[in-house]
Image (tube, coloured by chain):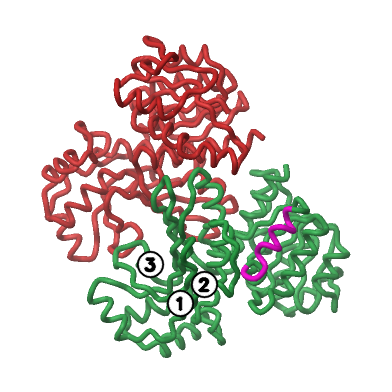
Chain colours: A green, B red
Amino acid sequence: MRICIIGFGAVGQGVARVISMKRDKVREKYGLDMELVAVTDSTGAAVSEEGLDPDLLLETKKKTGKVSEYPEHGVSDISGLEVMNEVEYDCLVEVTPTNIEDGEPARTHILAAFRAGKDVVTSNKGPLALSYSELIAEAESNSVQFKFEASVGGAMPILNFAHETLAGCDINSVFGILNGTTNFILSRMAKEGSSYEQTLNEAQQLGIAETNPAQDVDGIDAACKVVILANSILGRDVSFKDVEINGISKITPEAIYLAKKEGYLIKLIGEVSNEALEVSPRLVREGSPFAVGGTLNVATLKTDLAEDVTVVGKGAGSVETASAILSDIISVWKSRR
Amino acid sequence: MRICIIGFGAVGQGVARVISMKRDKVREKYGLDMELVAVTDSTGAAVSEEGLDPDLLLETKKKTGKVSEYPEHGVSDISGLEVMNEVEYDCLVEVTPTNIEDGEPARTHILAAFRAGKDVVTSNKGPLALSYSELIAEAESNSVQFKFEASVGGAMPILNFAHETLAGCDINSVFGILNGTTNFILSRMAKEGSSYEQTLNEAQQLGIAETNPAQDVDGIDAACKVVILANSILGRDVSFKDVEINGISKITPEAIYLAKKEGYLIKLIGEVSNEALEVSPRLVREGSPFAVGGTLNVATLKTDLAEDVTVVGKGAGSVETASAILSDIISVWKSRR
């Protein structure tokens, strides 16, 4: 399987690392031979029909900041789309940064791959939160696979879990902590009694929150995930604008203290059902699976036959998120055989 | 798909109920038409090439205690194996009671189905805990599907979760509460400060513990599950006798109190790794996913790429366990197409 990675930030580099680590094992276990034929970043690309060395890609990126500096096979000033048009590949891994304004350039990359008959695996929430039904329809009409487990829970599996592992059940709702950064901040505020501003500051220093933390703390990231869950698991047809969103910036240490006194914690919860589509701070009971701290994600699926089923896992991290992409690549391969 | 159910206790009846509830939906969603062609219990069988009505089966069993009383299609004094030899079917659902002495009659049923080229779905721990490698080899040499999700976590998915959802990861160990009855007893002892004997008595009155509770409280049920997890997920080749087992009957209210004072709970834990194969009471931290109460099951998979991934769900229940069997039936169907 010839793989083309568009985007070489944390997730893209994680994919290269995971391919380097697991290539032999995956070949042995699934008969799947993964070959990196093109990798792009904002500076250009590395392209080789004979396959790129993932370790050399990582080293080149680390040293120079540019994949286009890859020995002999680097190309500068070429866009992702141009690379996709010129290179022969089987599966696109779209891992450019999420853009919640118009979903670009990921939306264009993904649609172009579909129209060229290529399978796509992505972690990119933008196009899924804005143009879900368009993407699904285009994948179907071109008879290609489209997988995006990594877009929701990072390394906490939820989409394939609902569709495959729980194939016999109908899912009526999903209720979850879908953002690791806010869970870290709220857990720390509860533990230390510190203010929101101070705790955000600490999270930024630790690299857990970004310099511009709005996507996380204002609930935008979680809202994108709510949209993806609603469309993919509940079969709804909704978009980002349909989500009611409240972030965590107004949570005070006093509110957390009062909740704690009654045996509750405050968490930023995404709720997805046929009635609700919401991201907001909620009370959860101490001792429940929702009391998890740190950057963990957790989601409970309410089913018709198996009652509540809950998954807990790391919501972010380069290699962790890439592991979900690798599982999707393997799944694409299995259904192609 | 013509389905033959051998065994019509709680799980078998759950399967009939689930087929009745979901037949139309499963046909619509997966193109799978489930037809019950034979159902047996210890008194005989109901057999019909045109298909049995699951609701009438349930009603007949409830009224008379015998499937052989099924109108027009009942047959008395016929064994499961005889039915399997005489009826044309595609998939065997083996749900006779677990027998940890020699795995019979389930082992014989399953092997006979394999040799006749039939797929098998089971919740029966006995043959899996005693003859795992024999069964897998026989399924492979006959090129048939063999699925047993319901044998471990009831409605808490773990086998398909590890194999499919986490396909990109290697699983290094599993650590879990694998028995709902003991979790109920220990949780209640912690809450009420009551003795083991008294709490067991209450659990029996509530129908949560059986009259002969040894399989649960002595750790035998959990040990069977440890064997299945070790063989299926870690690729080990072990049997029931390889598990170190300690039950919960010696746990005192004092021990639970002392643990609680330090922020711990006592739970019956199954541990599966390349080094350990063990069922024993262990301390788990309050506030961790392992602090769940009631009859819930929980398992943490330690992976190489995604770190810890945890699932929580109902470990028992007729319809809940049958939902795992239905998911397996759908999975068999998908890989047959």
Q: Is residue A138 magenta?
A: yes
Residue nearest the observer in this picture, A199 or B329? B329
Q: Is residue A134 magenta?
A: yes
* Overall secondary structure of the magenta section: helix
Residue A292 image label: 3
Identify which residue is drawn at 58% across, 50% down.
B167
Q: Please tell me in which quadrant of the rendered image residue A122 appears.
A: bottom right
Residue nearest the observer in this picture, A328 or B128? A328
Give yes or no for contact between labels 2 and 3 (Cβ–Cβ under 8 Å): no
Q: Please tell me in which quadrant of the rendered image residue B25 appears.
A: top right
**Please, which chain is the residue tagged with disc 3 on?**
A
Look at mark 1 in the image and give the residue it sits on.
A182
Amino acid beneath label 3 = Val
Few, some or many C-alpha atoms within 10 Å of disc 2 (few <14, some 14-19, many ≥20)?
many
Image vertical order of residue B116 relative to residue A17, above or below: above
Label 2 to label 1, Cα distance in Å? 10 Å
Residue A299 image label: none
Look at mark 2 in the image and give the residue it sits on.
A222
Amino acid beneath label 1 = Thr
